[in-house]
Amino acid sequence: MIVTKIKGRKHKEVAHDINEYKVMWLLVFFDMPTETGEQRRAYTDFRKRLLNDGFTMFQFSIYVRHCASWENAEVHRKRVRGFIKEYGEVGILTITDKQFDSMELFHGVKKQKTEPRAIQLELF
């Protein structure tokens, strides 16, 4: 709790209970076959349910969701368990905001060989 003085009186400002060790991230990793129509429908249904539950695509088969607390993360973890069909493999990981913040992300670090640019043809 933070205490400040306003016009000679003590005024209490309640510090928010938001803490990088209490705020959680829920990560869902999945690998599902898409060889048959039924498997593709199961994959699409699973993915749509994740999106409808507030998850965001982090990578192709990794979805993340921010949760305000462990209890909130547990609610969404149970929902994801209910989304799982008989096909494929699904992993669910819960980490703190502090742990998520320590993640290192690299985007296109390795230089790739570029295609030579096409010469533009000019007509007069």
Image (cartoon, helix red, strand yellow):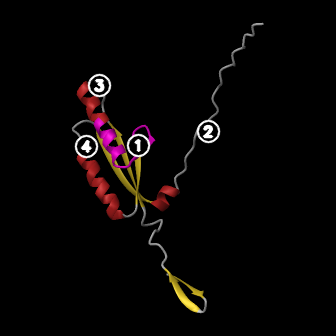
Q: Are marks 3 and 2 in contact (CB under 8 Å)?
A: no
Q: Position of residue 82 (x, y in %)?
A: 23, 48
How many numbered dots are placed on residues in this image?
4
First-in-chain label (4 vs 1): 1
Amino acid, disc 3: Glu
Q: Classify mark 4: residues with Cα within 10 Å, few (<14), some (14-19) or many (20+).
A: some
First-in-chain label (3 vs 1): 3
**Residue corresponding to mark 1:** 62
First-in-chain label (2 vs 4): 4
Q: Which mark is residue 35?
A: 3
The residue that appears at 75% across and 7% down in the rendered structure is 123
First-in-chain label (1 vs 2): 1
**Residue corresponding to mark 4:** 84
Q: Secondary structure at mark 2?
A: loop
**Residue corresponding to mark 2:** 109
The residue that appears at 29% across and 48% down in the rendered structure is 80
Q: Position of residue 122 (x, y in %)?
A: 75, 10
Cα–Cα span, label 4 and label 1: 15 Å
Amino acid, disc 4: Ile
